[in-house]
């Protein structure tokens, strides 16, 4: 996260995932994205952060707010390509490192995000593409220039199209809908958490993993059903399956989509990772 406090707070996932998950239509995805845009525009208006950005980044001067920039983008105003470039420079860790500016880029690129999500709908949702675009902004060079929008969307598409895409993220993040407060319930952690990263290095990692899971269940960090799922996934991976194939197989076994299994795994792994310092303190 950047040194300055962002306007949107990170939250953790719900304790119980849905038993089934119906695919979203493109219209539903567009409405969800519009809700995100509305929330971000409102928050930036309240914080007056856009005016601060204009002082630091002259490419934003032609628009008095993110809402005006959005309207310009929909009109295909060529100045908006420079706005995306300016916000990318502000959001990049090698630039202004402003998380809210990176979020504003994802909002400006909502049409492109929806197009990418539509082409990858079997395994990813709009929020996954949003998060990946946000991560690409954070990792980008601050001098992308007028091609920033195309570059960021292409990078997001390429990253999500790779085998095991998103399993090792370059920045630590969660759902952007949760960040903007557009969901009633806290959102699940994104797909960048790895269970084994929560386990401290010891002589016998398998024994330590067992101890961690036993402790985590006992203190209520995760439930027994989460432990069963994690162990089932690990067993399939240890048997030689790639991670996505293991998730697909386990999903079929449980009668749910692969992405539901992935989210349940990522939520449990995120909770274990967050609880690891407490676990280490108690066993020290």
Image: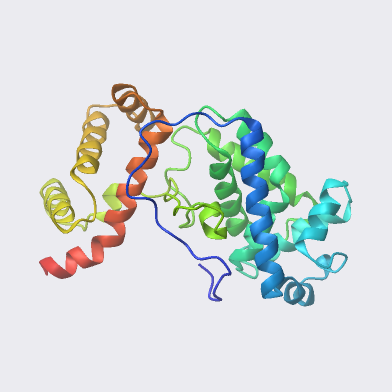
Number of labelled discs?
A: 0
The image position of residue 131, as x and y in percent, is: 55, 49
The image position of residue 97, as x and y in percent, is: 60, 68
Compared with 260, 173 (above or below) is: below
Compared with 80, 101 (above or below) is: below
Compared with 264, 184 (above or below) is: below
Colouring used for the render: rainbow
Snapshot quadrant of residue 251: top left
At 39% across and 52% down in the image, what residue appears? 13
At 56% across and 30% down in the image, what residue appears? 121
The image position of residue 188, as x and y in percent, is: 42, 49
In front of the other: 18 or 213: 18
At 61% across and 49% down in the image, what residue appears? 133
Residue 163 located left or right of residue 153: left
In front of the other: 213 or 82: 213
Compared with 107, 64 (above or below) is: below
Residue 194 showing in the rendered view: no
Give the position of the C terminus as an image quadrant: bottom left
Residue 255 showing in the rendered view: yes
The image position of residue 140, as x and y in percent, is: 63, 56
Which residue reaches farthest front?
184
Residue 71 located left or right of residue 138: right
Snapshot quadrant of residue 65: bottom right
Residue 63 located left or right of residue 225: right
């Amino acid at each position: 996260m950047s040194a300055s406090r962002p306007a949107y707070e990170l939250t953790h996932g719900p304790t119980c995932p849905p038993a089934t998950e119906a695919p979203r239509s493109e219209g539903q995805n567009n409405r969800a994205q519009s809700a995100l845009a509305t929330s971000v525009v409102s928050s930036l208006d309240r914080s007056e952060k856009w005016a601060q950005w204009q002082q630091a980044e002259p490419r934003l001067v032609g628009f008095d707010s993110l809402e005006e920039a959005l309207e310009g983008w929909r009109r295909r105003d060529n100045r908006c390509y420079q706005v995306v470039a300016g916000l990318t420079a502000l959001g990049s860790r090698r630039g202004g490192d402003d998380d809210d500016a990176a979020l504003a880029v994802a909002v400006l690129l909502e049409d492109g995000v929806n197009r990418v999500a539509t082409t990858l709908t079997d395994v990813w949702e709009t929020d996954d593409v949003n998060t990946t675009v946000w991560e690409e902004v954070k990792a980008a060079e601050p001098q992308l220039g007028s091609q920033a929008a195309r570059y960021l969307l292409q990078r997001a598409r390429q990253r999500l199209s790779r085998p095991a895409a998103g399993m090792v993220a370059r920045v630590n993040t969660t759902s952007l809908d949760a960040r903007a407060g557009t969901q009633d319930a806290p959102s699940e952690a994104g797909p960048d958490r790895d269970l084994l990263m929560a386990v401290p290095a010891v002589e016998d990692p398998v024994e330590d993993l067992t101890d961690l899971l036993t402790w985590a269940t006992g203190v209520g960090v995760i439930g027994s059903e989460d432990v069963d799922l994690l162990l089932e996934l690990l067993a399939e991976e240890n048997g030689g399956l790639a991670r996505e194939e293991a998730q697909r197989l386990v999903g079929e076994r449980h009668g749910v989509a692969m992405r539901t299994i992935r989210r349940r795994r990522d939520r449990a792994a995120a909770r274990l990772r967050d609880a690891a310092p407490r676990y280490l303190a108690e066993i020290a």
